[in-house]
Image (spheres, rainbow, N blue to C red):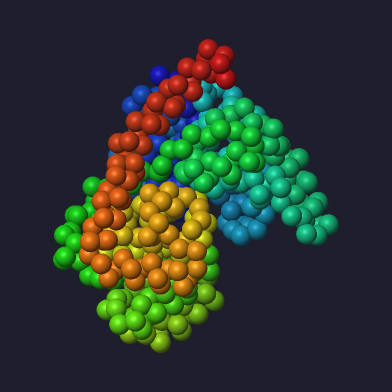
Amino acid sequence: MGSIAVVHHDLKSIGGAEAVCMNILEALQSQHDLYLITFEGADIDRLNQAFNTKVEPEEITIHQPRIFSILSKAFPKRFSILKDALRYLYLDLFLEDVDLVFSTKNEMYLDSFTLHYVHKSSFPDYINPNPQTVLREIYLSLSHWIGGLDESKVRNDVFLANSGWTATSLSEYYGVEPTVVYPPIDTARFTDQAWEDRESGFLCIGEIDPRKNILENIDIIAELWNRNHDVHLHIIGPINSRDYYRKVADRADDYDFIHIEGELSFEDINDMIDNHKYGIHGMSKEPFGMVVAEMIAGGMIPFVPNGGGQVEVVNKEGNLIYSSPSEAVKKTEHVISDLEVQQEIKGELEEMKTAFTKDRFHNEIRDIVDRTIDEQKSGNI
């Protein structure tokens, strides 16, 4: 048993990184003395409900310094690098007496040896940003000085990555060799509805934001409809960009078969996945693609752009990967028109379900943490 400080900047959100953090806490709570350090929103009961985890608050010592909540409220969308630099300064003072520091949301530039779980690297923003103006260059220099934002601090640390794609980027940035540990998916929450009982429609799940290429998704489904395929599209997710939402809503108004559902409950999303055959995920360089993995776990066939970790998530199945809207139309039409092809693809995707299970994730995390602590104590790291 060792003492471990699990660090996660912000636990207000309900996203993939927060699911990883909660599952790491659940995996380690019975075997180690855990400290959870977060700067926003450590409501364990709420997070347990959101991710179907069983983290016991009495098993964890929670540190949530109030000064950082005050800073976030005062400057919610400004000075993000400076705020992180101040957090690093605080952590360097606090983390002297633990066996292991475990950052569960991307790399952190700390004086302490750290185990990092990276969803998307911070390197382009922190270590190699584009200053653009003299004033911003001064701001970045000040942030680097306060927080010690130095890439050499992490070169001897241990890195975990959510996909091979993310691992490759970390290798290029830092010269490290990350271990790929796929995020956990709660596969038990789906009913595995029979294929013939599902609707021949598509789901697009995620924030309504330009990065998600939802307008392109609408055009792809509209072209399938124009080719006499009885399909429809449900757009599910919170609004992250009002301007983009208006564009999506205007485009959707042109078609009776495009439905904007907005932000749905956990249960309603499960029901949608259980009752539809296909998904389409438009983000071009998704580091992992939690939604894509959930679609597979729920028995759907998802189509994804040719980029990012989502290509691994669909088991590199060529029928599901497209490089342009026209290719997306061609490949989706091929699949939805042929039941035999659908069954073959579902068989290919079946093996990926075990790669995403919570038990697999918990076991991998426990093994890596135990091995890392042992190697530290023996001086091998």
Q: Quadrant of residue 59?
A: top left
Residue sitting at the far right: 134
Q: Nearer the viewer, residue 88 or 186?
A: 186
- Image check: 353 left or right of 312? left
Residue sitting at the far top: 378
Q: Is residue 97 above or below residue 326?
A: above
Q: Is residue 168 above or below residue 5?
A: below
Looking at the picture, how far across and down is residue 100, in whole percent?
51, 26
Q: Nearer the viewer, residue 26 or 191?
A: 191
Q: Quadrant of residue 20?
A: top left
Q: Is residue 102 above or below residue 352?
A: above
Looking at the picture, how far across and down is residue 363, in whole percent?
34, 31
Residue 283 in sight in this render? no
Residue 197 in sight in this render? yes
Looking at the picture, how far across and down is residue 379, in whole percent?
57, 14
Looking at the picture, how far across and down is residue 269, in whole percent?
30, 62
Q: Is residue 195 above or below residue 228?
A: above
* Quadrant containing the C terminus in the rendered view: top right
The image shows a total of numbered marks equal to: 0
Q: Nearer the viewer, residue 289 or 67?
A: 289
* Quadrant containing the N terminus in the rendered view: top left
Query: Residue at (61%, 60%) from the top-left corner?
Result: 77
Query: Residue at (41%, 51%) from the top-left corner?
Result: 316
Q: Nearer the viewer, residue 3 or 289?
A: 289
Query: Residue at (50%, 53%) from the top-left corner?
Result: 308
Query: Residue at (49%, 80%) from the top-left corner?
Result: 246
Residue sitting at the far bottom: 254
